Image: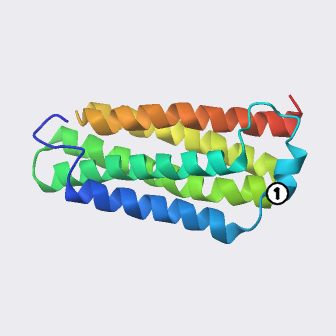
Amino acid sequence: MSRNTSIINGTSLFCGIISAVCAFFARMLSGSPLDMVHKLEGIDILPPIWIFNLLSVAWYFLIGAAAGAVIHGVNKGCVRGKEEIWAYRGGIFFSVTFFSGLIWYPLFFVGEALFFSLVTSIIITLSAVLCAYFWFGAKINNAALIMSAYTIWTFYVLIVNLSALFGI
Protein backbone atom coordinates (compact mmCIF):
# COMPACT_ATOMS: atom_id res chain seq x y z
CA MET A 1 0.00 0.00 0.00
CA SER A 2 1.08 3.53 -0.44
CA ARG A 3 1.92 5.83 2.43
CA ASN A 4 3.74 3.19 4.51
CA THR A 5 0.58 1.23 5.20
CA SER A 6 0.33 -2.48 4.58
CA ILE A 7 -2.51 -4.87 4.03
CA ILE A 8 -0.76 -7.26 6.41
CA ASN A 9 -1.01 -5.85 9.92
CA GLY A 10 -2.84 -6.64 13.13
CA THR A 11 -5.74 -4.32 12.43
CA SER A 12 -6.33 -5.84 8.99
CA LEU A 13 -6.17 -9.37 10.33
CA PHE A 14 -8.55 -8.55 13.18
CA CYS A 15 -11.06 -6.80 10.90
CA GLY A 16 -10.84 -9.62 8.36
CA ILE A 17 -11.55 -12.27 10.97
CA ILE A 18 -14.44 -10.30 12.45
CA SER A 19 -15.93 -9.78 8.97
CA ALA A 20 -15.61 -13.46 8.07
CA VAL A 21 -17.21 -14.50 11.37
CA CYS A 22 -20.11 -12.10 10.75
CA ALA A 23 -20.64 -13.55 7.26
CA PHE A 24 -20.43 -17.10 8.57
CA PHE A 25 -22.96 -16.52 11.34
CA ALA A 26 -25.29 -14.57 9.05
CA ARG A 27 -25.42 -17.63 6.83
CA MET A 28 -25.69 -20.21 9.60
CA LEU A 29 -28.26 -18.38 11.72
CA SER A 30 -30.56 -17.41 8.85
CA GLY A 31 -31.80 -20.92 8.15
CA SER A 32 -31.57 -23.56 5.48
CA PRO A 33 -31.14 -22.41 1.88
CA LEU A 34 -32.08 -25.82 0.45
CA ASP A 35 -35.59 -24.89 -0.74
CA MET A 36 -34.19 -22.04 -2.84
CA VAL A 37 -31.26 -24.14 -4.03
CA HIS A 38 -33.71 -26.74 -5.35
CA LYS A 39 -35.65 -24.01 -7.15
CA LEU A 40 -32.42 -22.75 -8.72
CA GLU A 41 -31.26 -26.10 -10.09
CA GLY A 42 -31.98 -24.94 -13.64
CA ILE A 43 -29.59 -22.00 -13.29
CA ASP A 44 -26.20 -23.20 -14.44
CA ILE A 45 -24.17 -20.28 -13.08
CA LEU A 46 -24.85 -21.11 -9.43
CA PRO A 47 -22.17 -23.33 -7.92
CA PRO A 48 -22.92 -25.80 -5.12
CA ILE A 49 -24.10 -23.91 -2.06
CA TRP A 50 -21.09 -24.88 0.04
CA ILE A 51 -18.74 -23.34 -2.56
CA PHE A 52 -20.91 -20.23 -2.74
CA ASN A 53 -20.82 -19.86 1.07
CA LEU A 54 -17.08 -20.53 1.23
CA LEU A 55 -16.40 -17.86 -1.40
CA SER A 56 -18.70 -15.40 0.36
CA VAL A 57 -16.95 -15.85 3.70
CA ALA A 58 -13.54 -15.59 2.02
CA TRP A 59 -14.58 -12.36 0.33
CA TYR A 60 -15.78 -11.02 3.65
CA PHE A 61 -12.39 -11.78 5.16
CA LEU A 62 -10.67 -9.93 2.32
CA ILE A 63 -12.87 -6.85 2.38
CA GLY A 64 -12.65 -6.75 6.17
CA ALA A 65 -8.86 -6.86 5.89
CA ALA A 66 -9.01 -4.04 3.34
CA ALA A 67 -11.09 -1.93 5.71
CA GLY A 68 -8.64 -2.75 8.49
CA ALA A 69 -5.78 -1.53 6.30
CA VAL A 70 -7.61 1.75 5.75
CA ILE A 71 -8.25 2.11 9.48
CA HIS A 72 -4.60 1.31 10.17
CA GLY A 73 -3.43 3.87 7.63
CA VAL A 74 -5.64 6.61 9.01
CA ASN A 75 -4.65 5.85 12.63
CA LYS A 76 -0.93 5.83 11.79
CA GLY A 77 -1.25 9.22 10.10
CA CYS A 78 -0.28 7.82 6.71
CA VAL A 79 -3.45 9.23 5.18
CA ARG A 80 -3.97 12.94 5.81
CA GLY A 81 -5.89 15.93 4.56
CA LYS A 82 -8.08 15.47 1.50
CA GLU A 83 -7.05 11.83 1.24
CA GLU A 84 -8.28 11.19 4.77
CA ILE A 85 -11.69 12.59 3.79
CA TRP A 86 -11.72 10.25 0.78
CA ALA A 87 -10.81 7.33 3.05
CA TYR A 88 -13.74 8.15 5.36
CA ARG A 89 -16.13 8.46 2.42
CA GLY A 90 -14.98 5.06 1.23
CA GLY A 91 -15.54 3.77 4.75
CA ILE A 92 -19.16 4.91 4.64
CA PHE A 93 -19.72 3.03 1.39
CA PHE A 94 -17.86 0.05 2.83
CA SER A 95 -20.33 -0.01 5.74
CA VAL A 96 -23.25 0.01 3.32
CA THR A 97 -21.63 -2.79 1.31
CA PHE A 98 -20.85 -4.84 4.39
CA PHE A 99 -24.25 -4.69 6.06
CA SER A 100 -26.20 -4.99 2.82
CA GLY A 101 -24.17 -8.09 2.02
CA LEU A 102 -25.11 -9.63 5.34
CA ILE A 103 -28.78 -8.96 4.58
CA TRP A 104 -28.70 -10.28 0.99
CA TYR A 105 -28.13 -13.95 1.83
CA PRO A 106 -31.16 -14.39 4.12
CA LEU A 107 -33.32 -12.38 1.70
CA PHE A 108 -32.34 -14.45 -1.32
CA PHE A 109 -31.76 -17.99 -0.08
CA VAL A 110 -33.98 -18.23 3.00
CA GLY A 111 -36.71 -15.65 2.56
CA GLU A 112 -36.88 -16.14 -1.22
CA ALA A 113 -37.64 -12.43 -1.53
CA LEU A 114 -36.16 -12.14 -5.00
CA PHE A 115 -37.15 -8.55 -5.74
CA PHE A 116 -35.85 -7.23 -2.42
CA SER A 117 -32.67 -9.26 -2.76
CA LEU A 118 -32.23 -7.79 -6.26
CA VAL A 119 -32.53 -4.27 -4.89
CA THR A 120 -30.10 -5.19 -2.12
CA SER A 121 -27.59 -6.65 -4.60
CA ILE A 122 -27.76 -3.46 -6.69
CA ILE A 123 -27.05 -1.44 -3.56
CA ILE A 124 -24.14 -3.74 -2.69
CA THR A 125 -22.63 -3.42 -6.15
CA LEU A 126 -22.97 0.36 -6.35
CA SER A 127 -21.61 0.93 -2.86
CA ALA A 128 -18.66 -1.42 -3.52
CA VAL A 129 -17.80 0.53 -6.67
CA LEU A 130 -18.01 3.83 -4.79
CA CYS A 131 -15.95 2.44 -1.90
CA ALA A 132 -13.20 1.34 -4.30
CA TYR A 133 -13.34 4.72 -6.05
CA PHE A 134 -12.90 6.67 -2.83
CA TRP A 135 -10.14 4.42 -1.54
CA PHE A 136 -8.28 4.85 -4.83
CA GLY A 137 -8.74 8.59 -4.32
CA ALA A 138 -7.25 8.26 -0.86
CA LYS A 139 -4.29 6.45 -2.45
CA ILE A 140 -4.88 3.32 -0.38
CA ASN A 141 -4.39 1.21 -3.45
CA ASN A 142 -4.30 -2.33 -2.03
CA ALA A 143 -7.57 -1.86 -0.19
CA ALA A 144 -9.10 -0.28 -3.29
CA LEU A 145 -7.92 -3.18 -5.46
CA ILE A 146 -9.51 -5.68 -3.08
CA MET A 147 -12.78 -3.75 -3.21
CA SER A 148 -12.53 -3.60 -7.01
CA ALA A 149 -12.12 -7.37 -7.15
CA TYR A 150 -15.01 -7.73 -4.71
CA THR A 151 -17.10 -5.68 -7.13
CA ILE A 152 -16.66 -8.47 -9.69
CA TRP A 153 -18.10 -10.90 -7.12
CA THR A 154 -21.02 -8.54 -6.50
CA PHE A 155 -21.72 -8.41 -10.25
CA TYR A 156 -21.80 -12.20 -10.25
CA VAL A 157 -24.25 -12.20 -7.33
CA LEU A 158 -26.35 -9.63 -9.20
CA ILE A 159 -26.43 -11.92 -12.25
CA VAL A 160 -27.46 -14.88 -10.09
CA ASN A 161 -30.21 -12.75 -8.59
CA LEU A 162 -31.42 -11.59 -12.01
CA SER A 163 -31.35 -15.18 -13.29
CA ALA A 164 -33.48 -16.35 -10.38
CA LEU A 165 -35.94 -13.48 -10.64
CA PHE A 166 -36.46 -13.55 -14.38
CA GLY A 167 -35.72 -17.23 -15.04
CA ILE A 168 -32.87 -16.44 -17.42
Q: Amino acid at mark 1?
A: Leu
Give how far across and how far down residue 69 sits, in percent: 25, 49
Residue at the spot 64% in from the left edge and 33% down from the top edge = 156
How many numbered circles does the render carry?
1
Q: Quadrant of the C terminus?
A: top right
Q: Do we see residue 129 in this rendering?
A: no
Residue at the spot 77% in from the left edge and 35% down from the top edge = 162
Q: Do we see residue 168 in this rendering?
A: yes
Give how far across and how far down residue 157 sits, in percent: 65, 38
As drawn, 142 above or below 14:
above
Q: Residues within 10 Å of mark 1 (few under 14, many from 20)?
A: few
- Taking depth in this image into account, of 82 and 67 the one nearest to the observer is 67
| Quadrant position of residue 33 | bottom right
- Taking depth in this image into account, of 92 and 52 the one nearest to the observer is 52
Residue at the spot 81% in from the left edge and 54% down from the top edge = 113
Q: Residue extending furthest top?
A: 168
Residue 128 placement, left or right of 38: left
Q: Residue extending furthest bottom?
A: 29
As drawn, 168 above or below 92:
above
Residue 72 placement, left or right of 65: left
Residue at the spot 50% in from the left edge and 42% down from the top edge = 127
As drawn, 149 above or below 78:
above
- Disc 1: which residue: 34
Residue 110 placement, left or right of 148: right
Give how far across and how far down residue 23 sits, in percent: 54, 60
